[in-house]
Image (cartoon, coloured by chain):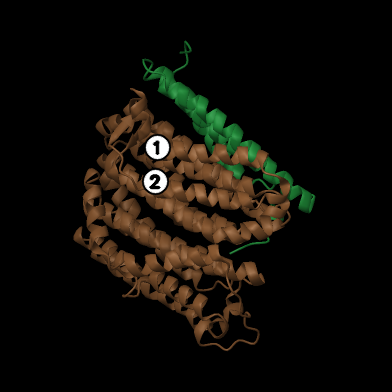
Chain colours: A green, B brown
Amino acid sequence: MIPGVSIHEILVLSSILFFIGVYGFITRKNLISILISVELILNSTVINFVVINKYLFPDILEGMIYGIFIIAVAAAETALAVAIIINLYRKTSSVDIKETETMKY
Amino acid sequence: MDLNSFFLMRHEMILLGIILLLIVAEIIVADSKKSSIVNLALLLFGIHTLSGFFPLQESSLFGGMFRSNDLIHFFKSVLNLGVFILLLQAADWIKEKVVENDRSTEFFILLFASLLGMYFMISAGDFLMFYIGLELSTLPVAALAAFEIMQRKSSEAGIKLILSAALASGVSLFGISMLYATTGSIYFDQIVLGLTETNLSILGFVLFFTGLAFKISLVPFHFWTADVYEGAPISIASYLSVISKGAAVFILMILLFSVLKPLMHIWENLVYGIALATMFTGNLFALRQQNMKRFLAFSSIAQAGFILLGLITGTQLGTTTVVYFVLIYIFSNLAAFGVVQAISLKTGKENLSDYEGLYRTNPKLSLVMMLALFSLAGIPPVAGFFGKFFLFTAAASKGYYLLVFLAVVNVTISLYYYLLVIRAIFLRKGTDPIPFFKNKLYMRLGLIITVLGILILGLYSPLYDYIYQLSAAFK
């Protein structure tokens, strides 16, 4: 628990991070930036879990453990996504979202 | 906890054993005999499928994180059966196209890893196990969707799947964190005790719902479906539409009926709206598709909308009808995808116009396709009719008459586009019909099992009674 900082301030921070991530996911034109936006969303949830655990339910460490697992799974997710993006880059020499528009509607 | 209680995880342990055995086999087997790995994987998984039907006791492990009861055990066996049929249908494709690149073992390992994730997901007892199972079931499928590395469409499908899956799971996690904040626990047993209708818990539930809605491809989250099905290898498209969707429906049902029961007034309305949106969107978009894989994608979106009619009830009848419908849906959709795969493998053709005059050259395949589409549309003698009939009965028994009426309207729309395919196959002459070809043993076996399933499941009533008994645990 951080002295002088209440749970509200940290939850506002994590919510802002979450919505920056969602906004970025929708508006970015580059596949790597979209991946970064997803990371923002996942990390905002980690902050949420840790803060809720620390401030509201400090007896059992469920939220902390959950946070560790989210970080690990997010790393696996990013590795796989980057691998697939590199594969597309080999075909098209670009990581622009326009390259993924051959199939539509 | 002793060694004996580990046998509760029999499905998981055997499947993990198969994965490890395949890795060893990949190292030992000489390069010239790589196609024997396909037979080995099929044999091992066949044994696993058979052994899955032996009964299992009802208990939980790891302080309630992993639990199993008769219904969960039965559903795992159903998933096994579906994957086994799918492997039979995919075996020829693997032998002809994948073995030469020396990547067949990868295919099996990734597919089995995803199935392992589904086992853990449907027998999860807390949100942590649920989340890990969900991710383990999604990530290997994304790798499989991008499996044909020489084709641009395949990578495109992989990217679309992995990015939308990551977004959906992120939003879902944000919701879980809110549910955790309201109840102070991530265990299902304790959440159901502490959950009340507050603003935070409702927001948390709605955000959480996106993760599973994405996997079932319900309407606001369905945009990836058609693109991924078109770009991915056909066996992966059929895996996504059948196994992945079935497992997600099952865990969603468990969560709604037991864990989120205190919020029932909220999710009733949510499911009502999403069911209508899903049915109409899926059916109306399916009308204008020319590619068979996209057509089946939108048809599977519409079927997910029908499944929601059973989910809205929250009763034992609802549970039974949903499991029964998913079982029938597995057989019908696998038959349809099997025919598409057989034709695509021999000729490379995937469009509706290529199917014109198919009956004159390949009458047996045409009959399989006809039965599959009749079952998906719900025409009486075949199983699909009974599945839909029971779903509508369940919804009507709770008084959702308007919803059932609109669902019947949707069945009529869907009948139109299923019959478009049947017209192309049976009535059109076609300028360039697909020439006659003979399927290999595995593909024929896979199609025969699905046809038997479609014909028998609907008329064999003890099965329905059996599922009804099993679902007493989730009222």
Q: Circle 2: is it few (<14), some (14-19), or many (20+) Cα within 10 Å?
A: some
Q: Which residue lies furthest to the right in this view?
A: A93
- Percent position of residue B167, x then y: 54, 43
Left or right: B445, with A84 as reference point? left
Which type of secondary structure does the marked residue at label 2 adopt?
helix
Residue kind at label 1, given as amino acid type: Arg
The quadrant in which residue B416 appears is bottom left
- Percent position of residue B120, x then y: 43, 38
- Name which residue lies at 27% across and 41% down: B258
The quadrant of the picture occupied by the C terminus of chain A is: bottom right
In the rendered image, the vertical position of residue B361 relative to residue B227, given as above or below:
below
The quadrant of the picture occupied by the N terminus of chain A is: top left
Q: Nearer the viewer, mark 1 or mark 2?
A: 2
Which type of secondary structure does the marked residue at label 1 adopt?
helix
Q: Mark 1 points at which residue?
A: B10
1 or 2: tag closer to the N-terminus: 1
Residue kind at label 2, given as amino acid type: Ser
Q: Is residue A26 visible?
A: no
- Percent position of residue B61, x then y: 35, 29
In the rendered image, the vertical position of residue B365 relative to residue B220, given as above or below:
below
Marks 1 and 2, Cα distance to the nearest angstrom? 9 Å
Q: Mark 2 points at which residue?
A: B51
> Badge 2 sits on which subunit?
B
Q: Can residue B44 be seen in this view?
A: yes
Number of marks present in the image shown? 2
Q: Which residue lies furthest to the top in this view?
A: A3
Front one among B29 and B190: B29
Q: Are marks 1 and 2 in contact (CB under 8 Å)?
A: yes
- Name which residue lies at 41% across and 59% down: B304
